[in-house]
Amino acid sequence: MNQTPILHVEGINKRFGAVQALKDVDLSLQSSEIHGLLGGNGAGKTTLMNVVYGLYKPDSGQIFLRGRPVTINSPRDAIAHGIGMVHQHFLQINTYTVTENIVLGTPIPHRPTMDLTQARDKIRALSDRFGLEIDPEAHIEDLPMGARQRVEILKALYRGVDILILDEPTTNLTPQEVDSLFESLKLMVAEGMSVVFITHKLREVMSVCDTISVLREGRRLLTAPRSELSEEEIVRTMVGSEEALEDSMLFSEQRRDEEAGIVREEIVLDVSDMRIADENGVLVDDLSLSVRAGEILGIAGVAGNGQQELAEGILGIRPLSRGRVRIGDRDVTGLGTRQILHLGVAYVPEDRLQDGFLPTASVAQNLILGAQRRTPYSSARGVLNRRAITETAVALIQRFHIRTQGPEDMAATLSGGNIQRMMLARAFAHPVRLLILHNPTSGLDIPSVEFVYDLLLSHKREGTATLLISDDLDELMLLSDRIATLYRGRIVGVLERSAFDKYTIGRMMSGVEAHD
């Protein structure tokens, strides 16, 4: 006998301007189930759950809870119906305690005295019950990212929800924290809760979810028990192709291992004793590393541990308080960013909207940004060669599958994923000695990720040195020859490829020295 789903959405449509984000989506969540919602960026996963949570109003369709139709116009309505959602970016007040953040917006029993003893006791009980270890009196600003996420989950549980939606919950967690989160989810489900787990990571849904649904281009194309699905079948559904995946970088370590022996002796990047500080304190300290020709050096670490500052220090965007940077045989310490880029360096920054992107300029202008004063784009007198710019832009748009009406389109009209493709196209457009890439596959679908991986390995074979900074540990372990782990601006350990182990790296991401 079929159970009535605890949550069912039927015929959900949602449009943003010309973009149809959701197209007649049906989805059911059973009681005591972890339901994985999988799909590439822009597939509609988060949009669908934002409809359920009352952040978006659907253009059409209906939501049912326990078989009855409901109208959800706001997150307050959703919480009243027992639905909670933890977003990728936490809404927390850093100077408040854990308890103060959790009770914010809820009735407080002793408002005149602001006595939160009762609330703290309830939070401790929930923490113990579901394995969400936290100190209710700790200040948010003192907590690591994994603990901050536990605060967000406790915030939902404190409000009594029985449906919990998690949006990309493992993005900034160490492997140990991911395992702990999964154990907590299993405890919740054992007590009758239901969880929607939004992710793009195949191995996670295969390890923790009971049921998996795949969305592509706003449509639900697949729902099945995990036990009936393979990773290859899921990827084919996500990509929309039946072509063989035997050689895919996403599934084969062998292809990458074959590349591991081509690192050369020449040191292309050498950073010695780097220290970067500002008014907020020391951001990078006592940092030394080198990258050889034909080598991919991965930089691991929880976001915000000095990764961006390291890249900007190498490129002259941030001044060094101490230390030296050499590219080849040249000391570039103190040089301007333009001079460093002209030495054969390409950079794809983490924040694609703020760094290296001109929203009111054309796609063509963005594609040659940084090279606009060089031939063939500019004459000796500084006159732009618009024909050469357009020809290059057309070729790069085609090669990198940038979805745009043409090179003269305003860059601000591009989607986030297409902006990322544009920045990658610019980085790979010219011969380079050194690539510095920060989360290069963020916002890309699976075919585009494969394309980027192949480009990186192609440049590796040609002798390009690559500093690959990524929040995706699987990506680092797949591509890197060595991985250095950053914690609070310091390198706590470096592993050779033969010694890669995600739990060892996870411990280093938590500040444990490699030799410990």
Image (cartoon, helix red, strand yellow):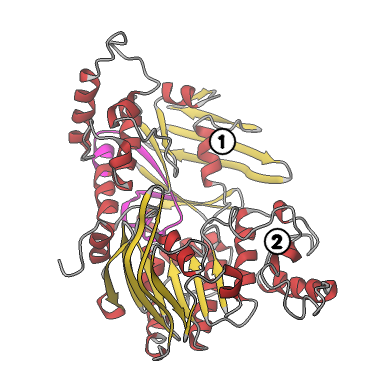
Question: Percent x, y for residue 274?
Answer: 37, 68
The mark nearer the N terminus, 2 or 1, is 1
Residue neighbourhood size for the residue with mark 2, other residues' Cα within 10 Å, grouped as few (<14), some (14–19), many (≥20)? some
Q: Which mark is residue 38?
A: none
Q: Amino acid at mark 2?
A: Arg
Task: Name the secondary structure under disc 1.
Answer: strand
Q: Can you see residue 447?
A: no
Residue 516: within the magenta? Answer: no
Q: Residue sitting at 45 percent across and 86 percent down? A: 293
Query: Which quadrant is home to the C terminus?
Result: bottom left
In the displayed image of the protein, which residue is found farthest to the left? 516
Indicate whether 298 appears above or below 352.
Answer: below
Judge by depth and name the residue closer to the eye, 93 or 220.
93
Q: Residue sitting at 80 percent across and 71 percent down? A: 390
Q: Which residues are magenta?
A: 186-212
Find disc 2 in the rendering and name its residue: 403
Question: Percent x, y for residue 80?
Answer: 42, 21
